[in-house]
Amino acid sequence: MRAVVARVTEASVTVGDEVTGAIDEPGLLVLLGIHVDDEVSKVAMMARKLHEARILRDEESCATTGAPLLVVSQFTLYGDTRKGRRPSWTQAARPEVAEPLVTAVVDALRERGARVETGRFGAMMAVRSANDGPFTLLIEV
């Protein structure tokens, strides 16, 4: 699993005219990609890393501050651009594998007490954010 995590002052995701998820206070925007070899055994570790990452202001985490997370699935995180001009998506999990794992990470975050908003799996989404810092990192498990 791979997540691009941005510290934000606000963020939202819209599908068509509907806002499917939004945070209007400092928190994390998480773009989450699932690899073809990922299994449910990685879910708890990813949820823990996202929830406890000390990347908010003053080295705080969502776990210590209660800051929200906006989790958006993004298969393109596993696009391979080493050859040619068109990315290969062979390392990204198929939707029938990826969707349950993304849902499981969101559920695991909520079980930890995290406030989580989401996008809509497989939809064309407009993601807006105000990056704080900017501070963005890659988390892999």
Image (tube, rainbow, N blue to C red):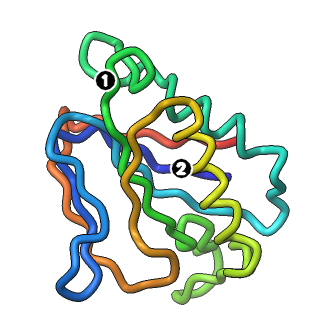
Reading the image, the residue beneath label 1 is 56
Depth check: 114 or 75 in front?
Answer: 114
- Disc 2 or 1, which lies upstream in sequence? 2
Depth check: 44 or 74 in front?
Answer: 44
Depth check: 90 or 81 in front?
Answer: 90
Q: Residue at x 69, y 73 (%)?
A: 92
Q: Is residue 58 left or right of residue 86?
A: left
Please provide percent x and percent y for residue 5.
42, 44
In terms of secondary structure, where does tag 2 sit?
strand
Tag 2: Cα neighbours inside 10 Å, few (<14), some, or many (≥20)?
A: many
Q: Is residue 51 left or right of residue 132?
A: right
Quarter of the figure with residue 59:
top left
Reading the image, the residue beneath label 2 is 3
Vertical position of residue 118 compared to residue 74: above or below? above
Quarter of the figure with residue 108:
top right
Please provide percent x and percent y for residue 19.
22, 71
Q: Residue at x 52, y 40 (%)?
A: 110
Depth check: 66 or 42 in front?
Answer: 66
Please provide percent x and percent y for residue 57.
24, 18
In terms of secondary structure, where does tag 1 sit?
loop
Please provide percent x and percent y for residue 43.
72, 45
Q: Amino acid at mark 2?
A: Ala
3D distance between C-alphas at marks 2 and 1? 16 Å
Tag 2–tag 1 contact (CB < 8 Å): no
For the C terminus, give its image quadrant: top right
Q: Residue at x 19, y 55 (%)?
A: 129
Q: Amino acid at mark 1?
A: Leu
Total numbered labels placed on residues in the image: 2
Tag 1: Cα neighbours inside 10 Å, few (<14), some, or many (≥20)?
A: many
